Image (cartoon, grey):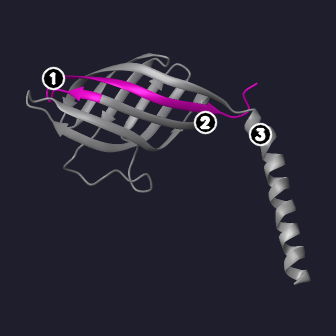
């Protein structure tokens, strides 16, 4: 009984120490909301390129197909890339697509995993892209999410 009590106290102290030492690191994390409009042009079957304008600005590459197997961050390349002056964001996005009566495809895609370069390196990135595209024409989306960077003062 005494051994269990001692083990419980040691585990509690270890957990408390982990929380207390992690708190300063978490306090240095700065999160920014992402909200941007995306306009795209259809360039190939399931591939769109376009402009991102809003709280982040740059160029977007999006490749998504409901016919292909789902993206797998461990096996495939990112299927959404955003190039900005401050760095690049590479994301694996998946979700749902619904064909609308007018021929447009409505998409709700969320990042399964994402990483960044330069100013986005080591950031925790969560993005969703929601909107419509007209196959062989153009698309319009909203890009929303958060980008949290550690070590920001």
On the image, the x and y values in percent for residue 1 come to 87, 84
Please say if 24 is above or below 73.
above
Residue 3: which quarter of the image? bottom right
Locate the C terminus and report the quarter of the image it occupies: top right
Nearest to viewer (mark 1 / mark 3)? 3
- Main SS of the magenta part reads strand
Disc 2 from disc 1: Cα separation: 34 Å
Snapshot quadrant of residue 15 = bottom right
Q: Earlier in the sequence, mark 2 or mark 1?
A: 2
Report the residue at 76% width, 34% height from top.
27
Q: Is residue 135 magenta?
A: yes
Residue 65 vertical position relative to residue 7 in the rendered view, above or below: above
In percent of the image, x 49 and y 24: which residue is there?
Answer: 34
Q: Is residue 145 magenta?
A: yes
Name the spot of residue 111 as percent of width and height, x first.
43, 41
Helix, strand or loop at mark 2: loop
Q: Nearer the viewer, residue 15 or 38?
A: 15
- What residue is pinned by disc 2? 123
Q: For the residues labelled 2 and 1, say whether their Cβ atoms are less than 8 Å apart.
A: no
Within-10-Å neighbours for mark 2: few <14, some 14–19, many 20+: many
Q: Quadrant of residue 18?
A: bottom right
- Compared with 44, 32 (above or below) is above
Q: Residue furthest bottom?
A: 1
Residue shown at 27% from the left, 40% from the top: 64
Q: Which residues are magenta?
A: 131-153
Report if the CB atoms under discs 2 and 3 are less than 8 Å apart: no
**Label whose residue precedes the other's in the sequence (2 or 3):** 3
**Could you say whether the residue bearing mark 3 is in a helix, strand or loop?**
helix
Residue at the spot of label 1:
137
- The residue indicated by pointer 3 is 25
How far, Cα to Cα, is label 2 from label 3? Answer: 13 Å
């Amino acid at each position: 009984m005494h051994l269990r009590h001692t083990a419980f106290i040691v585990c509690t102290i270890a957990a408390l120490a982990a929380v207390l030492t992690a708190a300063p690191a978490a306090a240095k994390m700065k999160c920014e909301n992402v909200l941007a409009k995306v306009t795209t042009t259809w360039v190939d079957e399931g591939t769109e390129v376009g402009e991102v304008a809003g709280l982040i600005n740059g160029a977007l590459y999006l490749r998504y197909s409901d016919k292909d197997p789902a993206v797998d961050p461990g096996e495939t390349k990112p299927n959404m890339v955003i190039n900005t002056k401050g760095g690049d964001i590479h994301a694996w996005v998946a979700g749902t697509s619904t064909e609308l009566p007018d021929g447009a495809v409505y998409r709700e895609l969320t990042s399964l995993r994402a990483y960044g370069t330069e100013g986005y390196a080591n950031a925790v990135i969560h993005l969703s892209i929601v909107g419509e595209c007209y196959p062989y024409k153009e698309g319009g989306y909203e890009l929303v999410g958060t980008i949290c960077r550690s070590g920001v003062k």
